[in-house]
Image (spheres, rainbow, N blue to C red):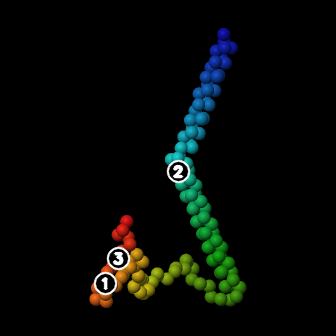
């Protein structure tokens, strides 16, 4: 009697355990869960790439200082070098509008046609 009860209980526990494992795996394979996992992996990859870039930048600055010292050049001031400010749009000239075409039927009258308005 006890033997049958033991095996019945063991079977029921194994069934509950297997059902729980299968349900967890199914939850992991839903589209929302897969999207969240992909986003997390992308964020982690971005952090690793950023750390790598910072390591490369530090090594580059260290090697540049070594070379400057070996060649007897004045070392650049410590700190990060900054890029110059981007030029304003006015310095580059007027921006052409790529989606507007102007047709001239007569020299006195100009018709403007914007392709974006058709949609």
- In which quadrant will I find the N terminus? top right
* Rendered residue at 57%/39% (across/down): 26
Write down the residue under mark 2. 36
Question: How many callouts does the rendering have?
Answer: 3
Q: Residue furthest top?
A: 1
Q: Along the horizontal axis of the image, is 97 left or right of 78?
A: left
Query: Which is in the foreground here, disc 3 or disc 2?
Result: 3
Residue at position x 51%, y 47% from top? 32
Q: Position of residue 56 (x, y in %)?
A: 64, 71
State the CA–CA distance, disc 3 to disc 2: 45 Å
Q: Earlier in the sequence, mark 2 or mark 1?
A: 2
Gap between marks 2 and 1 measured at Cα: 54 Å
SS at badge 1: strand
Q: Is residue 27 left or right of residue 2?
A: left
User: 94 or 119: which is nearer to us?
Assistant: 119
| Picture quadrant where residue 110 is located | bottom left
Quarter of the C terminus within the rendering: bottom left
Pointer 3: what residue? 113
Q: Which residue is mark 1?
A: 110
Residue farthest to the right, as pictured? 70
x, y percentage for residue 51? 60, 65
Residues 47 and 92: in front is: 92
Residue at (57, 62) in percent of width and height: 46
Residue 71: percent from left, percent from top = 70, 88
Please say if 7 is above or below 113. above
């Amino acid at each position: 009697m006890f033997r049958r009860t033991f095996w019945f209980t063991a079977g029921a526990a194994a069934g509950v355990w297997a059902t729980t494992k299968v349900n967890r795996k199914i939850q992991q394979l839903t589209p929302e869960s897969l999207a969240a996992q992909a986003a997390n992996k992308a964020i982690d990859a971005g952090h690793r790439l950023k750390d790598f870039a910072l390591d490369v930048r530090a090594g580059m600055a260290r090697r540049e200082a070594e070379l400057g010292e070996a060649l007897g050049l004045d070392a650049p001031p410590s700190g990060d070098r900054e890029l110059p400010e981007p030029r304003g749009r006015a310095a580059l000239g007027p921006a052409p509008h790529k989606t507007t075409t102007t047709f001239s039927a007569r020299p006195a009258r100009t018709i403007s046609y914007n392709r974006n308005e058709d949609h």
